[in-house]
Image (spheres, helix red, strand yellow):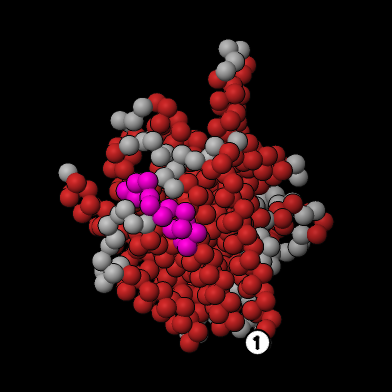
Amino acid sequence: MPWFLPLFVLGLLSWLMYGSIESYAAKHENPLWNRIPVLVRWLPVVQLFIMAIVRLQALLNRDTEHLEIARYFGEGSFSTSDLRLMITGDGGGELMALVVTIFAIQSNRLPSLSALELHLRQTFRVRMMLFTSFLLLFSAPILFPESAYYRPETFPTEPVAAMPSLEHVLPLVLLGGLIMFVGEMFAASSMFLGGKRVSILVLKMRIKVVLLAALALIWLTSEVSHAGDWLANLPDRSRVLLVVIALHLAVCIGFNIQPAVGQNAELKHGVGKSKAMLVSGAVMAFIVLFITPWHVTAHGALGSGIGPVLYATWMTSAAVSMMVLVQFLPAIGFDAAPRPEIWWMKIVLTFSPLILVPFTQFAVFLVPAVWIALACGSVVPWYIESDVTSPKTSFVIYPLLTMSVACGFVPLYSSQPLLSALWFGLVPCAISCIGLSLHVKSLRQASA
């Protein structure tokens, strides 16, 4: 079914516009229009379910016109142990996608949201569908490989490899969990008018995200330590890349984007707001432009000399350009967030590795630089705007700068520069998040 995957991609693309589709359909009293949002919601789920059924049928019948059957089993009789391939092979990605899509369209029914009004629950579902579709579209070339659509005449006539082991399931479990729970954080962080009830829910969401992010980083450390130069062998370890990107989104949204919604609300009108926004953007751009070339050069995969620096500069320039281009969005109505200009800069910078990775796998080196940039950019307004009380420099600024410098330099002397940068990059994010959160809490208590 060569047409099936393009249709699935179209279904996910419709999820990106689901909010507009649902609003437009609600304006019509025609029953047909009322069914269109339901069709759009369930189309990817039905497609994934059919894909899983077709794969299971091929496994039960030992149909060698399916690549995995020809590669691992060949002709013969079905054995119960063969069912393991449903989760360890390409079917594992399909089942994971099925779970996260069902979770997204049913997210408005989560028990934790039961106290919210109907329109807030529906908004939550729209944002969950948006985040999930974006991640699945990015992951589609890996979760749904092109090899599954090769002509059967090119398949091996005898088994050529052993069935993948159960350890291949772990990255899919981590990826699925991160998509679902980071999606919750993303949905909550973009519901700016949800009030305190949404803020209370976010605390529970953050615990799940932090635990999953910790597990993902531990697994990544174990995987990379045994894989050697995993970036050079990325076609064989592509699921590692998906976990890195999902971990990146978990850290950015969990430690910066979502906490900043409440923190920026305390900045009030802002005396010196324009200056703070300019300096914050310049700081984030400088950090990304400065740190990324160092880490790419330290890795050594692109050789030595000026080559790695030019390559990294191209990547960082693309990320910074996207950050600058979104500054017009608040002027055309996308201004619900506190400090919408800074919020859009952070969102685009967060998703920039995701956008650039399809063009180059080395875009993952943007990840630690983005973490540091977001952490440092968040504290800038608190020290520039004159009508707010600044946090103690000994509690926020000094530790933040120290660990940011460490994250920049330590990977230069490590055999795994990216992995070292990820571990050290977590610390500035935590310092910024915890320091500003405690400061905002003390300000609210003082004004109560």
* Residue drawn 32% across the image and 73% down it: 399
Res 119 → quadrant: top left
Relative depth, front residue between 276 and 107: 276
**Which quadrant: the C terminus?**
top left
Badge 1 is on which residue?
Answer: 304
Left or right for 436, reference 280: left
Residue 187, quarter of picture: top left
Judge by depth and name the residue closer to the eye, 398 or 89: 398
Q: Position of residue 440 (x, y in %)?
A: 27, 53
* Location of residue 220 in the rendering, given as x and y in whole percent from the top left corner: 46, 69
Magenta stretch holds residue 134: no
Left or right: where does residue 59 sit relative to residue 185? right
In the image, which residues are magenta? 265-280
User: Looking at the image, which residue is at 55% across and 25% down?
Assistant: 23
Residue 269 colored in magenta in the image: yes
Q: What residue is at 69 percent from the left and 44 percent from the top?
A: 5
Residue pictured at 49% horizontal, 41% vertical: 335
Residue 431: percent from left, percent from top:
32, 66
311 over 436 or under it: above or below: below
Q: How many marks?
A: 1
Crowdedness near tag 1: few (<14), some (14–19) or many (≥20) residues, C-alpha within 10 Å: few
Q: Amino acid at mark 1?
A: Ser
Front-most of 237 and 414?
Answer: 414
